[in-house]
Amino acid sequence: MSQDLWLQNYDAACRLAQEIAENIHERNRQQRTGGNPAKLNMTLRASLQKLKQNIAQLRETLNQTSAQRRIMQAEANRRQTLVDDLATRETRLNASFKGDLSEAEPSRSSLMTGGSGSGPAGNPWLVNESEETRGLSFGEIKHHQQQIIEAQDAGLDALAAVISRQKQMGQEIGNELEEQNEIIDDLAQLVDKTDSRIKNETHRVKLLDTKSASCELFQMKQPS
């Protein structure tokens, strides 16, 4: 079964953000120990630019998929939350790279949790999940989404079959109506012809009656 390409790209973007956080931590360590972080800075600039592009691509693909109704609205909303969270992480990583945070030397745990370092460290990529996907692995989530897509496809196929059947029934009814109209036209022509014949016969009968009456009157006037 093919994997969801959007989820694959999202997973790759998360790994890139994790790598950036690790490199920022290493860059800061080199600065403290008097090392030369120039190479790491170049790598970080390129990685941050790539992360920004990846997030933009995720948004664009999600908008297209949602507009085409290829995923359910609940799943579209969940993915939008994931992208927004990733974009927030990208902003914080940029601030950490440029040294714009209030802390002079943000700790590794701060970069990992997205906060000031207080409180227990956690996974920055976790968001509130639905009960359906809670506790599932990434592969299981992709399988679950594939099942949803297949169910949607099956529903669309069934709907298409119903529409096709209705269209066929409409065509059959239309054909039957045309046949009935032709029969009615034929009956109307037959009635017209019959009416015309009746009128002609009635006229002939009247003529015969007139002639018969005239003959009888003529015979009565003749001498015996």
Image: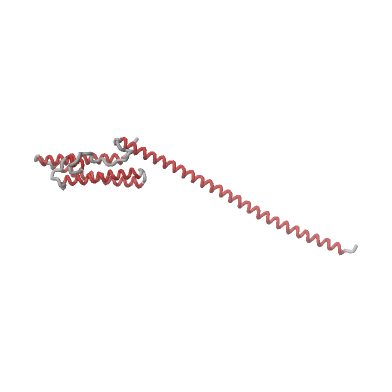
Question: Percent x, y for residue 207?
Answer: 76, 60
Note whether 190 is above or below 54 in the view shown.
below
Question: Percent x, y for residue 74?
Answer: 34, 44
As drawn, the residue found furthest toward the right would be 224
Please tell me which residue is depicted at 49% across the width and 45% down the height of the picture: 166
Q: Is residue 127 rendered to the left or right of residue 201?
A: left
How many marks the image carries: the answer is 0
As drawn, the residue found furthest toward the left would be 34
Question: Percent x, y for residue 140?
Answer: 32, 35
Q: How is the image coloured?
A: secondary structure
Q: Nearer the viewer, residue 146 or 200?
A: 146
Image quadrant occupied by the N terminus: top left
Image quadrant occupied by the C terminus: bottom right
Q: Which image quadrant is residue 202 in?
A: bottom right
Q: Is residue 220 rendered to the left or right of residue 104?
A: right
Please tell me which residue is depicted at 65% across the width and 54% down the height of the picture: 191
Q: Nearer the viewer, residue 222 or 25?
A: 25
Q: Which image quadrant is residue 130 in?
A: top left
Question: Percent x, y for residue 36?
Answer: 11, 41
Q: Which image quadrant is residue 132 in?
A: top left
Q: Nearer the viewer, residue 219 or 51?
A: 51
